[in-house]
Image (cartoon, rainbow, N blue to C red):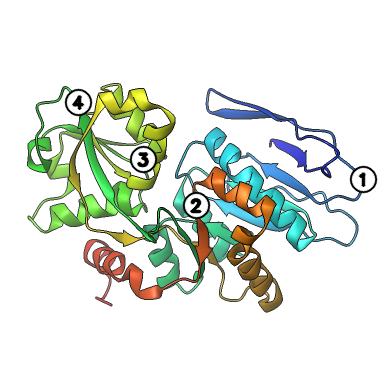
Amino acid sequence: MTKKRVCYPESSCFLKIWACLLLFTLLLIACRQEENYPYVEINLDTQAAVVAAELSPGKTPLRVAVAAVISPKATFDTYSPLLDYLAIKLDRPVELLQRPTYAEINELLRTGQADIAFVCGGAFVEGERENYMELLVVPRIQGRTTYQALIIVPVSSEVQNFDDLRGKRFAFTDPLSNSGRLYVQYRLANIGERPSSFFGDTIFTYSHDNSIRAVAEGIVDGASVDSLVYNALIQAEPDLKDKLRIVEQSPFFGIPPVVVHPQLNKELKESLRVALLEMHHDERGKKALQVLRVEEFVPPYSTGYDSIREMAAAVRGWPQP
């Protein structure tokens, strides 16, 4: 079981982190720490067990679970400033829990092994239905609290629309992903098809950036991906845009939310809510938001997830909401 300790010193020190992804294992070199300062513990083990936190005296760690929207290294790089901010605002250690699937993230929250989680809409409606997930806040990105599923193909592909993908090799991200699977399942169900009958073959990549690269490199003929991740990756790597083509855009869905267990300690829940809602007023918080590509966190709106609830009910055989 792999466990590394990452600290966030006062402004007099600088954070030193080297991270690389090798054969699906993320190796971290920790920085020097300052005594009695809140730290972030990174759990990179991919099993269901949670690594016990090395507690500072009298401090219980905040356990933050992050789903596989992007690859492990990208997730660590993206969320580190946020964890730093929360450690300072709450004056307690923070433990980052990464898991390769949304189902594992949901299980961490359901069993009380995580306090707060960043999930997608498909995973949220699953947890909500089982009464172990509650909306806390949602991000606003480019003025919106919505996003889309994008159906992408290689730029050289003869595929012009979704129907042309019949018999092709297609990539999903995660079994519980809304943009990475549920939308396509629902779309196919409406024409009397299933992924197994429509596509020639399907794979799971377990991250949207992996799906995007799989299409760009011609490993698959198409994929359904999160528009937020797609746009961020294209901006970071402009050359990718020349390798990809969007053939379909879904309707707008409620943006991937930040959630907690309904029975989480009320004081902690409120402290988390306030810390996230006020991030854009704090200099350190602003920097963390910039890395996340988020303008601000705002109060949630439950009705924004109605369309995902309806799709999940239709595909998973639930009673219609």
Image quarter of the C terminus: bottom left
Q: Which callout, 3 or 4, points at the residue further toward the start of the chain? A: 4
Tell me the residue at 59%/37% (across/down).
77
Relative to 108, 311 lies left or right: left
Q: Secondary structure at mark 4?
A: loop
Identify residue for label 1. Answer: 35
Tell me the residue at 40%/65% (across/down).
126
Image quarter of the N terminus: top right
Question: Which label lies toward us, 3 or 1?
Answer: 3
Give, as a three-letter code, the residue at label 1. Answer: Glu
Can residue 95 be seen in the rendering of this structure? no
Q: Which callout, 2 or 3, points at the residue further toward the start of the chain? A: 3
Residue 49 appears at what percent x and percent y? 63, 49
Q: Are marks 2 and 3 in contact (CB under 8 Å)?
A: no
Give, as a three-letter code, the residue at label 4. Answer: Val
Q: Which callout, 1 or 4, points at the residue further toward the start of the chain? A: 1
Badge 4 local density, few (<14 within 10 Å), some, or many (20+)? some
